[in-house]
Amino acid sequence: MNLNKKDFEFIEHTADAKFKAYGKNLNEVLENAAYATFRSMLDLSDVEPTLKKEINLSSSELDELLFNWISELIYYFDAENIVFKDFNAQVEKTKQGYELFSKVYGEKINPKKHKFETEVKAITYHDLEIEEKNGYQVQVVLDT
């Protein structure tokens, strides 16, 4: 992930975490949305990508794919105590919609090492957007 350009930005929200993520294609925008999700929780510079998970999803609509992608990542965070930092997403258009094949990298949560700023409970459908605009742009609200 190249963080020298604008990959995502946090947007003021009264109660939850909200961000926009950007990418030149669907793969990149989903990777940046995943990164922003975990960045909203903690500083990722302390996370080492020593553990790998493969996540494969399919959805009929892009916004549903985005929702399911972030939900799955939060599930691994909650259920297996994993924080992710690096994301490799490959989206393919199919007759039924879209398929996502991904590899994500991170490590088990270590309370002595990882200092959490926010607890993310779930992604919401509120203000969820995905659009093609000079590449792709998504907007996500996370329930904190």
Image: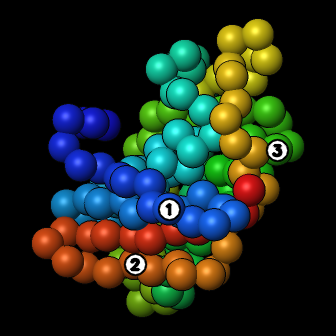
Q: Which label is found at residue 59?
A: none
Amino acid type, mark 2 = Ile
Q: Which residue is mark 2?
A: 130
Q: Is the C-beta separation of discs 2 and 1 under 8 Å? A: no
Q: Position of residue 121 (x, y in %)?
A: 78, 56
Q: Position of residue 38 (x, y in %)?
A: 57, 42
Residue at the farthest top position: 112
Residue ID at (31%, 70%): 137
Q: Which residue is mark 3?
A: 78
- Quick one: quadrant of the C terminus? bottom right
Q: Which residue is mark 1?
A: 12
Q: Regarding mark 2 in the picture, which secondary structure is present there?
A: strand
Q: Regarding mark 3 in the picture, which secondary structure is present there?
A: helix
In the rendered view, tell whether residue 44 sits above or below residue 6.
above
Upstream in the sequence, badge 3 or badge 1?
Answer: 1
Q: Position of residue 12 (x, y in %)?
A: 50, 62
Whole-number angstrom distance, CA of label 2 to CA of label 3? 25 Å
Upstream in the sequence, badge 2 or badge 1?
Answer: 1
Task: Inspect this view and state whether residue 49 appears.
Answer: no
